[in-house]
Image (cartoon, rainbow, N blue to C red):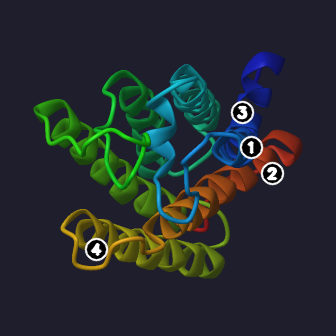
Amino acid sequence: MNGAKRVLPAFGALAAVQMIVVSTVDGLTRPGYDETRNWISQLSLGANGWHGTANLATCGLWVILCAVGLHGRADKRAVGLILWCGLCLVSLAVVRTDAGLGFPPGLPAEHTLRGLTHKLIALTLGLAGIGAAARVGPRRAARVVAAAVAVSFLAAGVLVLLDAGGVLPGNPSGLLERVALFVGLGWIGLAGGRATWDGSKTTGA
């Protein structure tokens, strides 16, 4: 195996670290943005929205490179799901979400076809992330991580609908989204890092 491909799985770890650090710092410095309520993709809106867009796009690229590096070294379905996660992240950067949940401040909530498309992409990202998490790393641990991602993602999805509908405004759906995304990316990044350093297969299957 050539050296370049051998290090590609480590880009999964880069994606996880970048997503956690950049989205957190960006959210803390954006007026009116509530990291417990607002979702990460909303950082693509408003002033300096290009920060959020660039973060999603580049993290997606790193995940795609991770999948390329894992080809032949991990379960084929896991590789395909990780690749799909990367493509979804890039797509979320291209297809901007709607304004809503009080952000950006002063703008009314939007309900556009573009925003609906963004939500459907986010749904497929969540499902692919759950599947990927379940298929990389030690089997027992992978199932626990996948369950944690699934529960937090489902809860975030339900709560954001209740918030948008005015039933339970200001709830912590954004926090639960972060748990799902950070844990899922972190687990994939850990598997990619292990594959880079020891060259072993990353699945218990």
List x then y, in percent, for residue 158. 28, 74
Please say if 17 is above or below 54.
below
Q: Residues under labels 3 and 1: Cα distance?
A: 21 Å
* Residue that label 1 marks: 25
Q: Residues under labels 1 and 4: Cα distance?
A: 26 Å
* Residue that label 4 marks: 158
**On the picture, is 20 further left or further right than 134?**
right
Outermost residue on the right side: it is 197
> Badge 1: how crowded within 10 Å, few (<14), some, or many (20+)?
few
* Residue that label 3 marks: 11
> Badge 2: how crowded within 10 Å, few (<14), some, or many (20+)?
some
The reply to whether discs 3 and 2 touch (Cβ–Cβ < 8 Å) is: no
Label whose residue precedes the other's in the sequence (1 or 2): 1
| Type of the residue with mark 1 | Val
Please say if 61 is above or below 129.
above
Give the residue at x 39% y 38%.
84
Q: Residue 74 or 22: which is nearer the viewer?
A: 22
**Label placed on residue 115:** none
| Type of the residue with mark 2 | Arg
Q: Residues under labels 4 and 3: Cα distance?
A: 31 Å
Dot 2 falls on a residue whose secondary structure is helix
| Type of the residue with mark 4 | Val
The reply to whether discs 1 and 4 touch (Cβ–Cβ < 8 Å) is: no
Give the residue at x 64% y 31%.
69
| Type of the residue with mark 3 | Phe
In the rendered image, is residue 205 in sight? no
* Residue that label 2 marks: 194
Q: Residue 9 or 125: which is nearer the viewer?
A: 125
Give the residue at x 51% y 47%.
40
